[in-house]
Amino acid sequence: MPKNDTQRKNLWRKILFTKDNFMETIPFDDRDGVIWFNGEMVPWREARLHVLSHALHYASCVFEGERSYAGKIFKLTEHSERLAMSAEALGFDLPYSVAEIDAACIETCKQNDIIDGYVRPVAWRGSEMMGVSAQATRINVAIAAWPWPSYFSPEARMKGIRLKTSDWRRPDPQTAPVMAKAAGLYMICTLSKHAAEAEGYDDCLMLDWRGQVAEATGANIFLVFDDGKLYTPTPDCFLDGITRRTVIDLARQRGIEVVERVIMPGELKDANEIFLTGTAAEVTPVGEIDDLKFSVGKITQWMMEDYDKAVGKEEAKDSGDDEAAA
Ligand SMILES: Cc1ncc(COP(=O)(O)O)c(C=O)c1O
């Protein structure tokens, strides 16, 4: 972990020169474009908030992660609905309807010329009150969008990414609003992912508070055993991802039986294939978990292909748009 400015700069340089995607390395507060901010488009660099914002101190913040493929945001309304549900789980109502958030996401992509990219709506309590109780704070909403090809590099994806089991666990639903995409829940994800990256892994596998297999830090998990069925943990204390639900539908359309049940870490050694699903990760094969190895099998490949088709990547490929096919 960097301990001072020089170490931080060195880490930054390392990231800058090892990432193939230059856009990822431009600081997020210093880009061209516009950001939708409480109903208006503001210049990107001016979309700022005060240091005494309640969300910064008390994590009263929810967000979404969406992707636009060939000019269309995949499952846009499901994401806007989840944003509203997450806000409600944190005790606040969004000052905009789902239809208004949908329209604002589309307009933000349009004004930033995003065809293939990532869309980030965020809603948070403002700076009107500072303290645990913050009933009268303004609820702010912003939406940013930027070009963003692949979460894991294409080579890492096809080899299968490497996961390490995290020491941190997904909390009990009586400890936190686990179904919400709430910023506070990502504290354990960042801690876990940093620990995994420090040992050369791509990401980590998180168990839940009972010691059952849960998910990765930003994606759900699927396994294939000898019976050829697709298994995934029941989402009772982590996000029931929109991609997870999409992949379950796609698998069933292929005639593959999908089983949602408790999965214990001891069962991982019996899996023939494992993959992750998420808006950012899409369908990403897992090659290793700790000292276990897995190959990229047939069902994983089918799900990758079917998901690419469902999001519209195949159409983009047919029309010669390479970026979308990356
Ligand atoms: C912790 C976590 N789990 C799962 C997912 C997958 O969710 P989705 O498929 O809706 O992107 C995400 C991504 O949003 C996530 O952050």
Image (cartoon, rainbow, N blue to C red):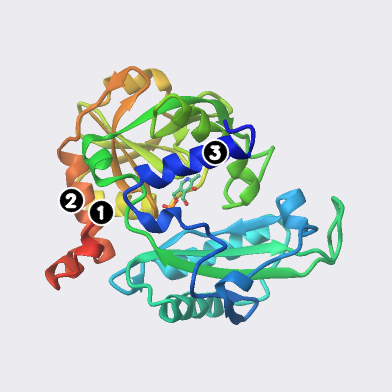
Please provide percent x and percent y for residue 76.
43, 69
Q: Given the image, on which type of amino acid does mark 3 rest?
A: Cys
Considering the numbered disc 3 on the image, is that residue within a helix, a strand or a loop?
helix
- Mark 2 Cα within 10 Å, few/some/many (few <14, many 20+)? few
- Mark 1 Cα within 10 Å, few/some/many (few <14, many 20+)? some
Residue at the spot of label 3 = 189
- Mark 3 Cα within 10 Å, few/some/many (few <14, many 20+)? many
Considering the numbered disc 1 on the image, is that residue within a helix, a strand or a loop?
helix
Please provide percent x and percent y for residue 125.
74, 62
Q: Which residue sits at x=27%, y=25%?
A: 271
Label 1 and label 3: CA atoms lie apart by 28 Å
Q: In this orientation, which residue lies closer to the viewer: 239 or 13?
A: 13
Q: Quadrant of the N terminus?
A: top right
**Does the beta carbon of the residue at mark 3 sit less than 8 Å from ligand 1?**
yes
Q: Given the image, on which type of amino acid does mark 1 rest?
A: Leu
Along the horizontal axis of the image, is 227 left or right of 198?
A: left
Label 3 and label 2: CA atoms lie apart by 33 Å
Residue at the spot of label 1 = 250
Q: Which residue in the rendered view is the most extreme toward the front?
A: 6
Q: Which residue sits at x=53%, y=61%?
A: 82
Along the horizontal axis of the image, is 124 left or right of 313?
A: right
Q: Which residue sits at x=45%, y=81%?
A: 111
Q: Given the image, on which type of amino acid does mark 2 rest?
A: Arg
